[in-house]
Image (tube, grey):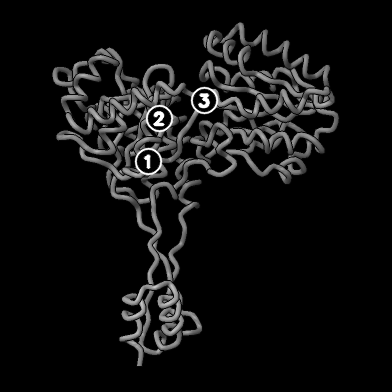
Amino acid sequence: MLRTSQPDFAKLFARVVNDRRESDKDVGHVVQQIITRVRAEGDAALVDLTRRYDGFELAQDGWQIGKDVCAAAFADLDPGLRTALETAANRIRAYHESQMPADRDYTDEQGVRLGARWTAVEAAGLYVPGGRASYPSSLLMNAIPARVAGVERLVVATPTPKGEVNPLVLAAAHLAGVDEVWRIGGAQAIAALAYGTDSIAPVDVITGPGNAFVAEAKRQLYGVVGIDMVAGPSEILVISDNKSDPDWIAADLLSQAEHDPTSQSILITDDLAFARLVEDAVDVMCASLSTNRTARASWEDYGVIIVVDDLLAEAPALANRLAAEHVELAVDDPEALFANIRHAGSVFLGRHTPEAVGDYVAGPNHVLPTGRRARFSSGLSVLDFIKRTSFIQLDEAALAAIGPAAVALAGAEGLPAHAKSVQVRLP
């Protein structure tokens, strides 16, 4: 627990801001070796690495999960769960359809036709973790924007440790219209999607969450393929006054702590007594969670409570330094705080807007920048699956109007062929 009034607050808060909570440098070397091997050996490397890390025999038990299996998983869902999944998919689709940018095509005063056209990438690879972080919601959040953008081929890579498959993930794949589901995971899956193998055709963009090895593989392969972001451990910042129910705030903090032992939950409040009530509520609630061990480790190692003197005057500046993935504003007038928050992955306004509703059914994407990357990047959107191509068209009169300036600039830069290609067309 920190107080902004304590003499060493700036030093202690800087430690919180600068604590990356991400993988050690040894991960980069291991991932580089895996990528090199997959690129050189292709399918053979995938077979060996999947056997080693997942205890699964691709050659014997199958590389893919068929569309029929995904359809059967969807049909077998409990009706209530199926409805919930459909509700989430419909809301995610509607929100992302509104993100599609418009093409431009106009002629300026000099008679030059200018514009831009948006087109989707041909193929997208979607990574879906197995084990602790196997979430159908993440599949929907990655696949649906790609489909809305117009991507023709959607490819899922998901590990199946010991052959285990999450039927909810398969149901979500069916609902989102995924074309291929490959039973591979880790850095080797990212390398296979980027470079392709005899069995797996390469993709243009790779998105989706994963462990430290997956994140590092995406970082190393950016440029070979596009990526959404390099994601780190999840995080939440809750800004609340003492009018909130401490149990509500405790639940919000634990909603991210239970993701991973390296997740981070932070509370900023202007009432020390309320801060202590929340701290007690976290302890009580954590004990009853099935994810208790993970949540407890996260809270004890990385949880922070900051008590300020003036919430409106101090909290936004602290929030902007943290640039958190999720920011909740649990106050009567969230707009006043929101107006001064510049860096955040996603903001949740008011006491009745828990971050968890954004993870599932609100509509905006829950794939968000972590590790202070909200300072310069945004959450996943249709824009990650499309690219803009500009176009230009001149007739003789338009070239006569602006061509001499191009000739002059090319000459000044010492590029005579550039100048000549324009000059030969001038009257």
Q: Which is in the foreground here, disc 1 or disc 3?
A: 1
Q: Is residue 146 visible?
A: yes
Residue at image location 39% in from the left, 26% down from the top: 28
Mark 3 Cα-neighbour bin, 10 Å: few <14, some 14–19, many ≥20: many
Cα gap from disc 2 to disc 1, whole angstroms: 10 Å
Residue at image location 68% in from the left, 31% down from the top: 352
Of residues 104 and 290, which is closer to you in this image?
A: 104
Which kind of residue does numbered mark 1 sit on?
Answer: Tyr
Does residue 346 sit above or below 289 in this rendering?
below
Which kind of residue does numbered mark 3 sit on?
Answer: Pro
**Circle 2 residue:** 216
Residue at image location 76% in from the left, 34% down from the top: 315
Which kind of residue does numbered mark 2 sit on?
Answer: Glu
**Circle 3 residue:** 233
Mark 1 Cα-neighbour bin, 10 Å: few <14, some 14–19, many ≥20: some
Residue at image location 32% in from the left, 26% down from the top: 158
**Circle 1 residue:** 222
Q: What is the secondary structure assignment of the residue under circle 1?
A: loop
| Percent position of residue 344, x then y | 62, 39
Mark 2 Cα-neighbour bin, 10 Å: few <14, some 14–19, many ≥20: many
- Horizontal side of residue 343 vs 61, given as left or right: right
Of residues 71 and 257, which is closer to you in this image?
A: 257
Cα gap from disc 1 to disc 3, whole angstroms: 20 Å
Of residues 39 and 412, which is closer to you in this image?
A: 412
Of residues 23 and 201, which is closer to you in this image?
A: 23
| Percent position of residue 362, x then y | 55, 37
Does residue 40 sit above or below 421 in this rendering?
above
Q: Is residue 75 visible?
A: no
